[in-house]
Image (cartoon, rainbow, N blue to C red):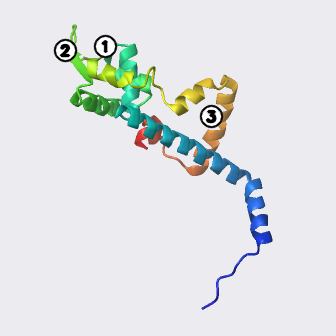
Amino acid sequence: MKPARSRRPGQVATATARADADPAVQALRRFRQIFATVRTHFRQVEQITGTGAAQLRALSLLREQPGLRISALAQAMDIHQSTASNLVKTLVERKLVIGARNGSDARVLHLNLLPAGEKVLQRLQGHYIGVLPQALQTLPPAVLRRLNTDLDLLLDAMQADDTAARSPLASL
């Protein structure tokens, strides 16, 4: 058996310096930072409220716009309608939201926050949007356009599937 080859300190430093200068490594590190920040935020929010980030976003939107339909909630959250339906089902089961059919079309379900849902939101003391969407909203439009163009190149290089684009981050 061949003994393991050890690197001298100078070799390790040179390899580290090369990695530090590699733009792909730098970009990967930034993605790691973003993912870690989002994951930490989700954990903290769930510890404070006992509720996941996607559910909190839905509750927050229903507080702002009582009577929303599932389709409007899905559009506001930029998720698939089936995902919104599943989210609402959980919120109804937890007695945080109530769905009522009223008006001329009995098929349409209008969603409203129940007191227990309001209580969950009060633990956050304010509007809930999420750390990444909030950070993106602070960037100037020109920066966002450039970021989208660059991310499109990355997604093409990865041959990424578009189906995850409209899934809540917490479910990925």
Image x and y of residue 69, in percent? 31, 18
Quadrant where the N terminus is found in the figure? bottom right
What amino acid type is highlighted by mark number 1?
A: Gly
Q: Residue at x 38, y 13 (%)?
A: 65
Q: For the view shown, which residue lies furthest in the bottom direction?
A: 1
Q: Which residue is mark 1?
A: 67
Image x and y of residue 125, in percent? 44, 21
71 left or right of 32?
left
**Of marks 1 and 3, the one in the foreground:** 1
What amino acid type is highlighted by mark number 3?
A: Asn
| Residue 169 shows up from this direction | no
Q: Which residue is mark 3?
A: 148
In the picture, the disc for residue 138 is none
Q: Is residue 6 above or below residue 47?
A: below
**Mark 1 vs mark 2, CA separation in Å:** 14 Å
| Residue 132 shows up from this direction | yes
Q: Earlier in the sequence, mark 1 or mark 3?
A: 1
Q: Residue at x 45, y 24 (%)?
A: 128
What amino acid type is highlighted by mark number 2?
A: Ala
